[in-house]
Amino acid sequence: MLGFGLGLNKWRRVGGGYVGLLDLFPNAAAAYSLRKLKTAYSGSAIRVRKEVSAVSSETDIGFLSDGSLDTSTLLTFASDADGGDVFVVTWYDQSLSNDATQSTGANQPKIVSGGSLVTENGKPALDFDGVNDDLTFTDTGTMANGCSSFHVLAADDAAQDSVAFYKVVDTNNTLSMGLRLNVIGARFREGGAETNKGGTSSTNQVLFAQTSDNTPIMTAAIDGVLVTSAASIRLSGVGSSIGSRRGNDYHYDGTMQEIVFFESDQSANRTAIETNINTFYSIYS
């Protein structure tokens, strides 16, 4: 278990700086967010695209000194965009170098719509259209020693069936777990059969956490509450993209603000990580 002696491990300012989630819980396999997650990270949050008279241009958008997204620069960039729309080309990985990107303009999620910043619960968000939007990982990697992931999102269409925006699979590709969106909860797939656990139909912003050890036992939690667990065998990966699954036959319809993957079991730290995320996003009481 990681121990840092920082109480509830909240996002907080220290001497004019801050302590981010990955300062408290390092070694993430990949980390995508519209807030800064690590003090030492010097890159941008996202690369965005606009069209002016149907001519495309791109720029990187970084963070302010308090770790929040530089929305002023983003909106200035959007000021002359056709329709006031700005799209995300790349969501940069703040942990290593596994950026999630999309080169096809029609498949890029939106972050400024009609001149207004896309937000969820008052904070910037990426908006996926549920039709063809997704961002592809540079490296899908492996999760041979267990894995954990934490996601902040809100579905636009609570009636949209079976659209999981990511999955973890075992080495025989017979058991996977992801997020079922029409009923906010966990979806297990084992031997071709699928089982859904937990939650009710909702378009509310949620914090979805998935953990598994190297047995592994898979667990899922919604808004800090453990909803289900299941036994499986060793895991092999986390899918290939943010926003779609199964070779792009399902696409996510809604917003996303943060996704963090660990190539290790974070069950012992789950509550502390959820507290850090919830403190910033105010998802649940």
Image (spheres, grey):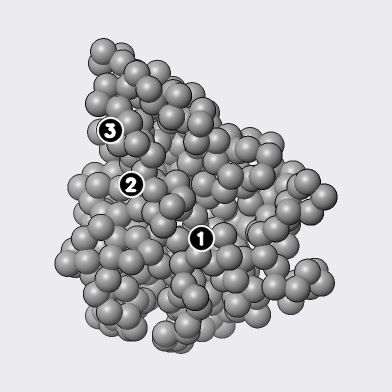
Judge whether 136 appears above or below 103 on screen. Answer: below
Please tell me the numbered disc located at residue 281. Answer: 1
Q: Residue type at mark 3: give it.
A: Gly
Instruction: Give the image quarter of residue 190.
Output: bottom left
Mark 1, other Cα within 10 Å: few <14 / some 14–19 / many ≥20: some
Q: Nearer the viewer, mark 1 or mark 2?
A: 1
Residue that numbered label 2 is attached to: 127
Label 2 SS: strand
Residue that numbered label 3 is attached to: 114
The residue drawn where x is 34% and y is 18% is 80
Mark 3, other Cα within 10 Å: few <14 / some 14–19 / many ≥20: some
Answer whether residue 172 is visible to the viewer in this image: no
Q: Residue type at mark 2: give it.
A: Asp
Place of residue 180 in the rendered image (x, y in percent of width and height, measured from the top left): 30, 70
Sequence-wise, the earlier of marks 1 and 3 is 3
Q: Nearer the viewer, mark 3 or mark 2?
A: 3
Label 3 SS: loop
Q: Nearer the viewer, residue 165 or 227?
A: 227
Q: Nearer the viewer, residue 112 or 40?
A: 112
C-alpha span from label 1 to label 2: 17 Å
The residue drawn where x is 20% and y is 47% is 131
Label 1 SS: helix
